[in-house]
Image (cartoon, rainbow, N blue to C red):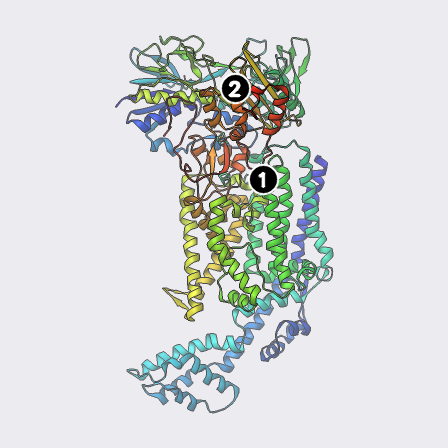
Amino acid sequence: MKHIVIIGNGISGTTAARNIRKRSNHTITIISSETDHFYSRTALMYIYMGHMKYEHTKPYEDGFWKKNKIDLVRDHVTDVHPKTKSLTLQSGRSIEYDILIIASGSKSNKFGWPGQDLEGVQGLYSYQDLERMEQTTKGISQAVIVGGGLIGIEMAEMLLSRKISVTLLVREKEFWNNVLPLQEANMISRHIRSHHVSLKLESELKEIQADEKDSVKAVVTKAGETIPCQFVGLTVGVSPNIEFLKDSGIEVKRGVIVNEFLETNIQDVYALGDCVERNYELPGRKNIEQVWYTSRMMGEVLAQTICGNKTKYEPGPWFNSAKFFDIEYQTYGNVANVLGSSETDFYWEHKSGMKSMHLVWDKNSNQFLGINSFGIRLRHECFDQWLRENRSITYVLKHLAEANFDPEFFPRYESEIMASFAIKFPHAELNPRLA
Amino acid sequence: MRAVKLFGLILLLIGFILFNATFFLARYKLTPEVIESKISEGPSRDLFFQTSTEMQGQTFATSFSFVTELRKNFEAINQEQISNYGITQEEVFDLVARSGKQFTLASVDSLYLGGDEASEFKKKAWKDYGGWLEGREFLSPEELQTQLEGVVNNINQYAIINQVGFDRYQVKDLTYSITKASAIGPVASNPLLFLFLTIGLFIIGALTYILPKLNLLPGIKNNGIFFNAMKNTGWLGILTGTWLIVFYIILYFYPEYMTNWVIVVDPVSRVLNGNEAGRFFLYGFIYTLCILVMGVRMIIHYRHSKYQILRTYSVMFFQTAFAFLIPEILIRLNKPYFDFKNIWPLDYSFFFDSRINELVSHGTLGLFMLGWGVALIIIGVPVLVYFFGKRWYCSWVCGCGGLAETLGDPYRQLSNKTIKAWKVERWMVHGVLVFAIVMTAGVIYTYWTDASWFLFFDSYKLREVYGAFIGAGFAGVVGTGFYPLMGNRVWCRFGCPLAAYLGIVQRFKSRFRITTNGGQCISCGNCSTYCEMGIDVRWYAQRGQNIVRSSCVGCGICSSVCPRGVLNLEVKEESGRFGKPILIGNNHIKISE
Ligand SMILES: Cc1cc2nc3c(=O)[nH]c(=O)nc-3n(C[C@H](O)[C@H](O)[C@H](O)COP(=O)(O)OP(=O)(O)OC[C@H]3O[C@@H](n4cnc5c(N)ncnc54)[C@H](O)[C@@H]3O)c2cc1C
Ligand code: SF4
Ligand code: SF4
């Protein structure tokens, strides 16, 4: 029986702990300085908006941990000492481990802008960030959000729910165009505007101005525009949260370096989740992936390895999802913002401007590569299988109806999509009706 | 938009305040006409006339004083009759002296020779209540005396009041109907005006408040719910809950005080069924309006979801047509009251002798109704649950469900999601089902055999207890009164025996399940929070397991609120329903068990 210590009670650390518990009798301790119990970070926005309370975001009841003999420690790890296999905590306490799992997640990026540490300027990552936001947005009327990503759009929705007007500064040509192809990015931009967000595209932050009390008063863009505001949300991405490791001897670059078994350079020290940087390539994937699903999958894999079944982290085809105000988004496989040289695509948009589908395939082999879907739910299982089986675009279109995951009675669009596809690609070999 | 909403709110409040004021807005005066119209001709009516002479001249300022006085009258009459017809201790001594150790009815005959009415009554009472002692021999005269005193007790307590006085059921009915008929004042003389000023203003206000929601873009709009004093068990929620609880208690247990409310809907009742309104007409009327008005809200709120829209139309239709209009029209046509969508054991009195007799006495139509009701129980429920899940009833047809899904929708997030609550729920709801079955078995047994004693119970007592505690207390007072306190499905979840029955079928033999979409769940908790049945949907979703729960009413809200498109209510072939949890996306991990 070993003592397994996990730094971080997010989805990755928690998944590892739960799965280790199912397979073994090891002593498990989870240390986190953020909250007493695991909660769902992805639901932070809903607490602010009054859809849920904090306790609703906890996926397990508080008694779960004791029942499953998982010890929880609320403290901050300040140093890791691999030589003595011990940790120093902020409280002065020291904890020894046999196996260490680093699951410390991310922190919000800041790029050294003038005024970025003023009162009323913040990112949104932790529960403490949320509490701060709750405080600093009380009674204010204008906010500026810098950065057009998923957290930026969530922050916009949060602020609007409190009747605070929002200006969103986005560097790209359309919202999230660094990830989405132009068509979808444009559709989402329109939707954002329909919610009365002042969306400023191709604009960047120059500085944040303070009032006499060192609170934010306005932001100035690179184009020279001054936008008065009492709150600035900085949502320009996140990066691995690994400062506390800098003197530990554990190899880090942007994140903690791990191999395919999620091992670090040091024996018995593993890392997973948002904080890792893979030292090997996976096709179509970046080496740092900061999403819920990959963090969870790493937890599942590492638990196997630790319990004696050494397993590689080999995620299947990429998938992700999000929601932009009222439009749900799902993606399977790879749809890049700019087509690759051997790729071609088909884009369909419903006349409402609230639904669209974008399929990408290989020009030469017709192999289906990926899909973006907005406003129409798709069945993960189908696309996972089709991508693994290297199915053709024709096959996917022909079976598109099987992959529909919308609730009963919802209008269906497959035939409209096929018809519009046939107009654009009249040649027989691509026609799903003839295939 | 704000101004319109505010205006709506004010109208709604005025309507509500006037409705409450109406409760007190009457004086009461007992007239000979009222007595004649409410008490059928005979010695009881004459007695009542005599006893109530003093009361007849008076005007009472409140229903409370009037009802108190009225009750005193009934009490006085009963006392009087007991002294007229009661059997005295001397008579018992006399009988014992005449009988020695052996009792015969002949000795009774020899005791009462007067031939007057009282003597005849007593003779008959001895026969009815003491006939079983005929010819019995006891060890001593004292022992016989004890037996006879028991008989006398029964006679004095029941026989007299039942036959020549007013028993408690009559007192209850008469107090209510006489009070209603004796009301004078603005409401009684202008019921239509007050219908408009109370319920009418309330509806107009509510719709004015609701309709501007159309200005919001379609989509899930749950902003601020947990900051809202109404929707998060704040002061407003507690106040509303208290009002509802008091309303239900009055409705079920003290209807004689709320007659002024009933008067308000008299005109509606006259139009529909030709009679004046009863309290349950009022209740049905308000109930239907709540479902309709709040149904409009529900449709606007979820107008991006066809499933929610159709489901809401469905409950609005079934309530209005099946629960409200058709039964009233049946009454107008002199046919038995019948709600074609109500199913035993929710409709717990379905097998009561009074109802069966009524149906049987109506020939073909009555027999059809009887057959229809039985067919729903033994064919309708299992077959439809097999093909669609229990939702076909609970969130598409049922009246309780209809109210929960419309009036109760703003409170769905208040259901308790803990494992402990789930445990309590299983014990309670199945306990009520057993209770309903035993009670009904007793009723049927008594119907066939005429014996009231069934197993260890008195079947009359049992149905009375069921009616009061489950039918009125649980389904009504707790069921709706607790909306703002414990969510909108307290009754459906913890108390409804039909839900328990539907649930057992759904759990073990159905094609219905909620599927989860591969690995897309982000454990956010929206689904669990908004599940009115307190199912921890996320628990299943985050491990990729189908949700197959007996309590799921298939409202589809979990699927609607999920921001990642993870949940879908599906009907598929039965195999694979209880699949192992699977989270797709990880090559080497097939099962995350
Ligand atoms: C607002 C928001 C919305 C998001 N929405 C989505 C989404 O919709 N879909 C999606 O896929 N992803 C989403 N993400 C990203 C997703 O939440 C992360 O990828 C995921 O939470 C990472 O999990 P993790 O376990 O690696 O780390 P984390 O969840 O960050 O957990 C790490 C924990 O470790 C603690 N910790 C760190 N260092 C120490 C230390 N030295 N001592 C003690 N404790 C320490 C931290 O306080 C934290 O509690 C969102 C993120 C945010 C902020
Ligand atoms: S199923 Fe949907 S609503 Fe429920 S926890 Fe998962 S993502 Fe959230
Ligand atoms: S599980 Fe979903 S469909 Fe079933 S009752 Fe709960 S919210 Fe409704």
The percent position of residue A78, horizontal first and vertical second, equals: 39, 14
Q: What residue type is disc 2 on?
A: Gly
Residue at the location (38% across, 28% down)? B592
The percent position of residue A100, horizontal first and vertical second, equals: 33, 17
Tell me the tag on residue B308: 1
The answer to whether B279 is drawn above or below residue A387 in the figure is: below
Residue at mark 2: chain: A
Q: Is residue B154 left or right of residue A339?
A: left
Q: Which quadrant is the C terminus of chain A positioned in?
A: top right
Residue at the location (56% across, 56% down)? B340
Which image quarter: residue A294?
A: top left
**Mark 2 lies within 8 Å of ligand 1 (Cβ measured):** no
How packed is label 1: few (under 14 Cα within 10 Å), some, or many (20 or more)? many
How far separated are the C-alphas under marks 2 and 1? 31 Å
**Mark 1 lies within 8 Å of ligand 3 (Cβ measured):** no
The answer to whether B528 is drawn above or below residue B443 in the figure is: above
Q: Nearer the viewer, mark 2 or mark 1?
A: 2
Residue at the location (43% across, 68% down)? B446
Q: What residue type is disc 1 on?
A: Gln
Are the numbered discs 2 and 1 placed on the same chain, yes or no? no
Visible residue check, residue A66? yes
Report the residue marked by disc 2.
A370
> In this view of the protein, which residue sits in the foreground, A370 or A82?
A370
> In this view of the protein, which residue sits in the foreground, A253 or B311?
B311
Visible residue check, residue A144? no
Residue at mark 1: chain: B
Q: How many labels, in total?
A: 2
Q: Which quadrant is the N terminus of chain A positioned in?
A: top left
The percent position of residue B393, horizontal first and vertical second, equals: 52, 48
Which image quarter: residue A196?
A: top right
